[in-house]
Image: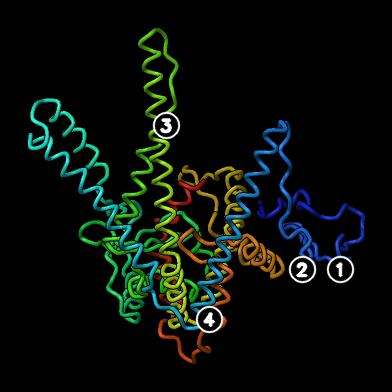
Amino acid sequence: MSTTDAPADRPAAGRPPAGSAERCPGCRSALAVNERFPTWCPSCEWNLLPPEPAPTNRTPRQQRAAERAERREEAARRDVRERSEQVFNLVSAGGSDLRDGSTTAAFALAGVVHLVSLTVLLLGLGLVTGLLLPGWPGRLLGVIALAVAFQLRPRLGRPSRDGVLDRTAAPALYALVDRISEELGAPKVDSIAVDGEWNASFAVLGLRRHRQLTVGLPLWTALAPQQRVAVLAHEIGRCVNGDRRRSLWNGSALGALVEWYRMTVPSPTRTQRGLIGVLVVLAELVANRVLWVLNRAVHGLTLLMNRLWMRAGQAAEYRADLLAVRLTSVADTRGALTALLHRQTFETVLNRQRTVPPRRTGSGRDATPDLWQSLAEAVRTVPPLETERRLRAAARLAEAVDSTHPPTDLRLRMLTAAEPEQHRHPVVLDSGRAALIEAELAARRERIAVDLL
């Protein structure tokens, strides 16, 4: 369901008709109207999720299929919510031990994945060398098996080269990140990349286990200085929060499953003519049936591994949030998490900026519209009532940053049990250092704005 900002030149979805009393149709409470956002009722949550326009020209069969899909989606959402609540209650009660039966099973399943890849590799070597099946047919099968083994190899990932800032170009930013790493007892990052996403991430990649921090410039722009510290602390905290999902053993197994899934996606059947063409079509149909079965099996294994890691993974994310609180404050960490819900505002600003014609500068070059100033102003002026609507909508939909994170509303609830506010924050991003970092990001700002617009 869409909850994006409503354009200023038309009323938002679900708004009472013009000229009517601004009263909730459900409970008759007074409504606060803002032209930028949907009108809703905090008392009974009328229009909390503005309805989307119903698709037209659907056949009865398509309508029934859509309704079944909606029921399945709602059931999956309830399941995720229930399991997330269980993890939340466990961690709230102090049971945040990341090692349990499901974690052991996940380790074992990762071993099965690696064993399959190794078996295919050994089979290919045995066939190519003639130990298993002498003659050219065996060698041909061996080459095919080795090609498959190469595709099934564990995926360790590669550090991004796009948007990477080296230490000489961004000494203030690296100094801030190094200070956070020191406070958390984490190793220093090897590189920092800056992209155009409404997010931030941390990954350990490649055989050399390259530690790369990625900062989404739109999200960074919308955050206050201490909220930026909270986001960085959460990401770097992944090195010390006991999260085993990102280990070489488990991470490479999950990457291999993703590659298996891609390899087993059935291909479209092509139309052929003649006897040979009919035989080819029949062969493709049989192959696609086999691939479909394998694809569903791999999909099931991937879901199973994610479910086995759910408790440990979500507990690790809560611990990373609490590490962020330790370096900043509960208010700063809450502000950073709440800002994640304002992606809709970012997308609205982006769409509007794309309609602004480029301005000509004195040098004759096109000047990029001021995307960043507009974004910061738009997020700053989101009213508290709209923020509350987005928080409640996220809770109802069990929205999370991605499938590896707990629902955002549960992360916010966990912060209420955090330690009391500190008198002194270990890491403070003062105005002087913040200005230095902004100067270091200036070139990337211009480049990312061009790419986004």
Of labels 2 and 4, earlier in sequence is 2
Q: Position of residue 375 (x, y in %)?
A: 57, 59
Distance, label 1 to label 4, CA atoms, is 33 Å
Q: Is residue 414 left or right of residue 427?
A: right
- The amino acid marked with disc number 3 is Arg
Residue at 41% of width from left, 70% of height from top? 312
Q: Position of residue 310 (x, y in %)?
A: 45, 65
Crowding at mark 1 (Cα within 10 Å: few <14, some 14-19, many 20+): some
Distance, label 2 to label 4, CA atoms, is 25 Å
- The amino acid marked with disc number 4 is Val
SS for callout 1? loop
**Residue 330 has which mark?**
4
Distance, label 1 to label 3, CA atoms, is 57 Å
- Is residue 158 among the parts visible in the rendering? no
Residue at numbered disc 1: 29
Give whichever of 147, 305 is nearer the camera. 305
Give whichever of 212, 262 is nearer the camera. 262
Residue at numbered disc 2: 42
Crowding at mark 4 (Cα within 10 Å: few <14, some 14-19, many 20+): many
Q: Are marks 2 and 1 in contact (CB under 8 Å)?
A: yes
**Residue 103 has which mark?**
none
- Is residue 7 among the parts visible in the rendering? yes
Q: Are marks 1 and 4 in contact (CB under 8 Å)?
A: no
Q: Is residue 12 left or right of residue 339?
A: right
On screen, 42 above or below 52?
Answer: below
Crowding at mark 2 (Cα within 10 Å: few <14, some 14-19, many 20+): some
Residue at numbered disc 3: 289
